[in-house]
Image (cartoon, rainbow, N blue to C red):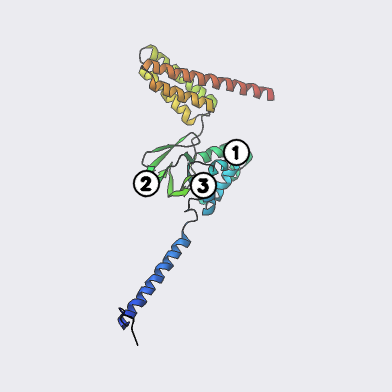
């Protein structure tokens, strides 16, 4: 038998090597195909956040809640947004009847606030998670990141998967629903301002403007973090805080904060009076 130039006949040893190489190649291809077929459905980033969650198959309650709260358009928009997404199992751990109650039209605003507490404006990857870090949610409240033995927690919920890319943001999976703090009523907000002024004015008049600034600043930040305020009232407090920080003197800072608190208090009193009138007329 003639042998092509430069190629020797296959010896038994060469045949064994050739069989081994073929077997390894087949095994490698089989492993690759298995890995591709078992990859999470949400791994691709061509879909938006809602489509990514739907493809995963474990966020059906979250999607239904987002639609009921009218948030689906925001989650399918341009973004970018970061969503800390509770699984269906996480929603199932809520007290019996909670989900059904929240999905009722009468509770749309409350449901929207809870869901917004899971959403951050912008793209926040896992690299930005650090112990003690705070993130401002679309609900207007901050959430706190804390380091655990394995990974991180957000307001006590474990972050079980991170950096699931979507076309309009990123999704991190959490193992329970996180709830925003109870909102301070508008009457409570007005009382908070009144108490701050009652404490701050005597200190200012006795030459302790620094203490007055501290009292007014704490009151403003408390209102922003937990009070039921209108958008305009929130903007006024934020402008007051910025003006206080940029003031040329401590006394000017105290006055800038006082002006903001007075404006918001006036708005709160007016709305409370109108609510009282409307209640009386409805009797």
Nearer the camera: disc 1 or disc 2 = 1
Eyeballing the image, is 274 above or below 161? above
Dot 3 or dot 1: first in sequence order is 3
Q: Which residue is mark 2?
A: 148
Q: Tag 3, which secondary structure?
A: helix
On screen, residue 65 versus residue 32, left or right, reads right
Q: Residue placed farthest to the top in the image?
A: 205
Dot 3 or dot 2: first in sequence order is 3
The answer to whether one can see residue 113 in this image is: yes
Residue 81 badge: none
Q: Which residue is mark 3?
A: 49
Label 1, label 2: how many angstroms apart (C-alpha)? 34 Å
Total marks placed: 3
Q: Tag 2, which secondary structure?
A: loop
Instruction: Report which quarter residue 204 is drawn in.
Output: top left
Could you say where residue 87 lies in the image, as x and y percent from the top left?
Answer: 50, 50
Instruction: Report which quarter residue 106 is drawn in.
Output: top right
Q: Considering depth in this image, is 8 or 146 the residue closer to the camera?
A: 8
Dot 1 or dot 2: first in sequence order is 1
Q: Considering depth in this image, is 153 or 22 the residue closer to the camera?
A: 22
Q: Residue placed farthest to the front in the image?
A: 5
Marks 3 & 1, CB-CB < 8 Å contact: no
Could you say where residue 89 lies in the image, as x and y percent from the top left?
Answer: 51, 51
On screen, residue 144 versus residue 191, left or right, reads left
Q: Which residue is mark 1?
A: 108
Nearer the camera: disc 3 or disc 2 = 3
For label 1, count other residues whose C-alpha is less than 10 Å away and answer few (under 14), some (14-19) or many (20+): some
Q: Tag 1, which secondary structure?
A: helix
Could you say where residue 243 lies in the image, as x and y percent from the top left?
Answer: 42, 21
Q: Point out the image quarter for the C terminus.
A: top right
């Amino acid at each position: 038998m003639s042998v092509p130039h430069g190629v020797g006949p296959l010896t038994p040893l060469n045949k064994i090597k050739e069989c081994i190489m073929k077997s390894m190649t087949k095994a490698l291809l089989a492993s690759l195909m298995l890995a591709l077929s078992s990859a999470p459905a949400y791994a691709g980033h061509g879909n938006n956040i809602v489509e990514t969650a739907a493809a995963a198959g474990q966020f059906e309650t979250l999607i239904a809640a987002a639609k009921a709260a009218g948030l689906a358009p925001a989650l399918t928009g341009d973004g970018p947004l970061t969503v800390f997404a509770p699984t269906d199992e996480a929603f199932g751990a809520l007290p019996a009847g909670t989900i059904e109650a929240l999905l009722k039209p009468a509770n749309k605003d409350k449901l929207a606030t809870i869901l917004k507490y899971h959403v951050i404006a912008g793209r926040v990857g896992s690299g930005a998670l650090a112990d003690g870090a705070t993130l401002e949610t679309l609900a207007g409240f901050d959430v706190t990141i804390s380091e655990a033995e394995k990974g991180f927690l957000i307001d006590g919920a474990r972050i079980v998967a991170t950096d699931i890319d979507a076309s309009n943001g990123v999704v991190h999976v959490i193992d329970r629903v996180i709830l925003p703090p109870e909102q301070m009523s508008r009457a409570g907000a007005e009382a908070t301002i009144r108490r701050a002024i009652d404490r701050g004015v005597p200190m200012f008049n006795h030459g302790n403007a620094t203490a007055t600034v501290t009292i007014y600043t704490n009151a403003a930040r408390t209102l922003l973090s937990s009070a039921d305020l209108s958008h305009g009232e929130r903007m006024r407090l934020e402008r007051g805080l910025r003006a206080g920080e940029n003031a040329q003197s401590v006394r000017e800072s105290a006055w800038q904060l006082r002006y903001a608190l007075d404006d918001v208090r006036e708005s709160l009193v007016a709305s409370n009076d109108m609510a009282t009138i409307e209640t009386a007329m409805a009797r």
